[in-house]
Image: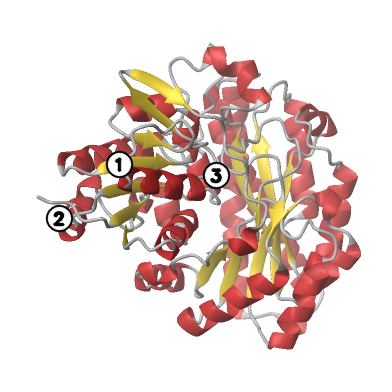
Amino acid sequence: MSLSSTILFTHSYFLRFDPKQWKTGQPYAPLGTLYAAALLREAGYPVALFDTMFATSAEEITPAITQHRPRFLVIYDDGFNYLTKMCLTNMREAAFRMMQLGKEKGCTVIVASSDATDHYEAYLQAGADFVLPGEAEHTLLELVQAIEQQQTDYHTIHGLAYQQQQQVLKTPPRNVLKFLDGLPFPAWDLVNIAPYRNMWLQHAGYFSINMATTRGCPFKCNWCAKPIYGNRYNSRSPENVIQEIQLLKERFQFDHIWFCDDIFGLKPGWVNTFAQLTATAGLTFRYKIQSRADLLEENYIQDLARSGCDNIWIGAESGSQQILDAMDKGTTIAQIRSATKLIRQYGMHPSFFIQFGYLGETRQDIQQTIHMINELLPSSIGISVSYPLPGTRFHEKVKTQLTLKSNWTHSDEMALMFRNTYAPAFYKHLHKYVHHTYQQHLVAHTLASTLQRPAQLRPRHVKKVMQLLYLLPATFFAKIKLNRLQKLPNA
């Protein structure tokens, strides 16, 4: 089979391999993959996409390879999605299998992902010809150009790992991109958007897409890995972002955007300009962002609200100041309280990311976190247990304990992979207990507020009563089990 110069892009996130996310049914397209494909196409290369999001096995890529006969198979994961930063073993195994299938068809196999950045030698040993650690679009372009020109010496290409004469070579890291407006918009035309739209409408009742306005995060939380975009913070211009939103509105008629930046609108004046441009363009849509409690001041929140933001996810992490300080989080419980109040004041929903199981966390710290959740009652909570990511100070502290298990199989595994105050079973059940007690307080608060205005009583409030009648005993028995698990030896 003769190979064409086509570049076949894919990624290694299979929604079906992640039971929690499949059940949630809110998939986002592989944005990082689409950026890389757009840049290579802009440079004149024919590109194609095999989107694994709804695939059932790695073998499903074979017809795409047969159809396009690509010279290059590029497994390029989304660097903006926290799920792909977690390096789930289900996805790694799928990547290895696709690499094998590509090699069997004579493709040059190139891999760029968080997992490959951290474990480039494993990917090379599994059959990859090249791994591109870090921010990889321009590395990929230079590499493809060099191979097309039949070069065999790649040491001048920064951001590259490869084998030569059975030795693994790694070139100096590539500097991160600063002028993000210079990138073409993601190659959205390569995606079959229908299954994304259908799944969103089925599970959420609206259709959300993802966009990135920045790359990187300048803050120093010692458990947060930044293998792709690093500690720098670079931003697209508001004008550039508005232009893409207009194009996506025309093409997809979406209802909602997830701005998947680690920190949205950190650059002074950015959100204010964005809000003005949104109004001038007559754009109406809802969106959610991620931010920090110490950044959520009133002017910033006001601009978010008037530009369509309806949900702000705060990295609250813990209700214990001791744990926040141990994490080098740089925020306070008082700032979390203040930010939550302001978000609600401007008609938006505050949501919390919560992390249990950080080193040294005691039952008192856990209780303080539960109390904070039940007192502030965020609109949503996302709970995890501490997950050691390579390249972090946290990982350095526990890496000697990660001999038997260093990655989760899927995102709902919730396994504590290092020795801590309690046994892993305690933390896994803690997740369930906290959700029960949070839902109980949330329902009770809703009913109490409604009873103060009897005229607003509706049939749906009967369902709330039934829900509360379930949650009260469920929470009680979950707490009994948690107390029993607390006594397990932490071997």
> What's the amino acid at mark 3?
Glu
User: Which marked residue is nearer to the observer: mark 2 or mark 1?
Assistant: 1
* Residue matched to label 1: 150
Residues packed near mark 3 inside 10 Å, few (<14), some (14 to 19) or many (20 plus) = many
Residue placed at 29% from the left, 28% from the top? 126
In the rendered view, tell whether residue 154 sits above or below residue 57. above
**Residue plotted at (56% across, 54% down):** 470
Q: In which quarter of the image is residue 245?
A: bottom right
Q: Can residue 12 be seen in this view?
A: no
Q: Distance between the residues labelled 1 and 3?
A: 24 Å
Alpha carbon distance from label 2 to label 1 = 24 Å
User: In terms of sequence position, does the residue under pointer 1 or pointer 3 come before the other?
Assistant: 3
Q: Label 2 neighbourhood size at 10 Å, few (<14), some (14-19), many (20+)? A: few
Three-letter residue code for mark 1: Gln
Say few, some or many: other residues with alpha carbon within 10 Å of mark 1 (under 14 / 14 to 19 / 20 or more): few
* Circle on res. 489: none
SS category of the residue bearing label 2: helix
Q: Is mark 3 on a helix, strand or loop?
A: loop
Cα distance in 3D space between marks 2 and 3: 29 Å
Please tell me which residue is depicted at 45% across the width and 46% down the height of the picture: 142
x and y percentages locating residue 355 in the rendered image:
66, 38
Name the side, left or right, on which 416 lies relative to 279.
Answer: left
- The residue that mark 2 highlights is 66
- 48 to the left or right of 185: left
- The residue beneath circle 3 is 135
Residue 167 image position (x, y, % from top left): 36, 18
Q: Which of marks 1 and 3 is in front?
A: 1
Q: Which amino acid does label 2 sit on?
A: Thr
In the picture, residue 419 is in which quadrant? Answer: top right
